[in-house]
Image: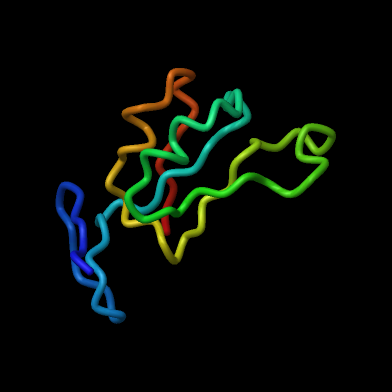
């Protein structure tokens, strides 16, 4: 499998290349359109467990161990719902 790097990527102890800044997560601005699900090369995004709307959470969760911080989710999101967080 080819590792992806974002700007300023660095190698982790598992051998994966990670972006130095962290991972991208969906905020409550997410509309649940799914564009990012099809775009993520690492398949690091998943639908949130049921009841996310009642809890005031985003409809998507990021699997931190899979996200390489490439930012493709942020680029494709029509709602600008992704922010970068420390890994």
Left or right for 56, reference 33: right
Compared to 8, does 51 lie above or below?
A: above
Q: What residue is drawn where x is 31% and y is 80%?
A: 14
In percent of width and height, residue 57 lies at 70, 37
Left or right for 8, reference 55: left
Left or right for 63, reference 20: right
In percent of width and height, residue 81 lies at 49, 27
| Circle count | 0
In percent of width and height, residue 17 lies at 22, 65
Q: Which quadrant does the N terminus fall into?
A: bottom left
Which one is nearer the viewer's eye here, 20 or 33?
33
**Residue farthest top in this picture:** 78
Image colouring: rainbow
In percent of width and height, residue 8 lies at 15, 53
Q: What residue is drawn where x is 20% and y is 57%?
A: 4
Q: What residue is drawn where x is 32% and y is 50%?
A: 41
**Residue farthest bottom in this picture:** 13
Left or right for 1, reference 64: left
Q: Which quadrant does the C terminus fall into?
A: bottom left
Compared to 64, does 28 lie above or below?
A: above
Q: What residue is drawn where x is 32% and y is 56%?
A: 68
Which one is nearer the viewer's eye here, 9 or 63?
63
């Amino acid at each position: 499998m080819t590792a992806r790097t974002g700007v300023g990527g660095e190698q982790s102890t598992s051998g994966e290349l990670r972006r130095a800044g962290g991972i991208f997560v969906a905020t409550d601005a997410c509309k649940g359109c799914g564009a990012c699900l099809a775009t993520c090369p690492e398949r690091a995004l998943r639908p949130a467990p049921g009841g996310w709307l009642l809890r005031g959470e985003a409809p998507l969760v990021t699997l931190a161990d899979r996200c390489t911080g490439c930012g493709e989710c942020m680029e494709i999101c029509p709602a600008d719902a992704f922010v970068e967080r420390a890994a």
